Image (cartoon, helix red, strand yellow):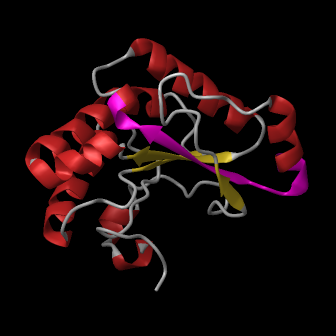
Amino acid sequence: LLTALPFSVSATLPAANKRAVPSHGFNLPGWFEREGGTAPAPAVLEKLRQTGFETIRLPVNGDLVADGNRAALRAIQRGVAELVGLGFAVLVDMHPSGDLRAAFERDPASAAERVVQAWTALRVVIADLPEDSVYPELLNEPPMERSDWLALREHLAATLRAKCPLHALVWGPARFQGIW
């Protein structure tokens, strides 16, 4: 990609991060997907890391943070920092709740604004975490048509970039993600 950019633009970009693209990972649901979620035991995480796992996909329910809930934001910050401290790369996955999925069916514009509000609150947490270990995933399996998703994706990317200019952003196609 850098070779495709004009020299003046690529010369201003920061050096590539030293960490390789995250791999050998697992999903860690149930911690920040609901209020009062359960954190995994540190011994379990340490064992998984010793076994060779390098990456954790950490689903976060945007409804928990969209209103700026400081306790939830602090808990997410501590949790992600703990995972990074154990040597994991962490994909912070904005995971739509059942309510948000239903909102996308009823009122897509309002639902999209809820996701923007969630990232506006959460980006402050992400900005304080190392960009070579923490990867924000804009929206898991966006429940919308491609054209709507592309517009929202650009808005979310700009929202995150305002505070997290060096973090690599993760996104997939609308409706379903995967390698086909």
Q: Is residue 58 magenta?
A: yes
Q: Is residue 70 visible?
A: yes
Residue 107 appears left or right of 85: left
Looking at the image, which is closer to me, 52 or 6? Answer: 52
Residue 84 % position (x, y): 68, 37
Residue nearest the observer in this picture, 124 or 111: 111
Q: Is residue 53 above or below residue 118?
A: below
Residue 163 visible in rendering: no
Image quadrant in which you'd find residue 1: bottom left
Return the x and y of residue 77 as percentages of the image width and height: 55, 25
Q: Residue at x 85, y 57 (%)?
A: 52
Q: Position of residue 44 (x, y in %)?
A: 84, 39
- For image coordinates 73% across by 63% down, the residue present is 24
Residue 132 among magenta residues:
no
Looking at the image, residue 71 lies above or below residue 89: above
Residue 78 as seen in the image, left or right of residue 139: right
Residue displayed at 62% across by 63% down: 21
Query: What residue is rendered at 38% in x and 43% in y?
Result: 165
Residue most extreme to the bottom: 180
Read off the magenta span: 49-63
Asked if 64 appears above or below 153 in the picture, the reply is above
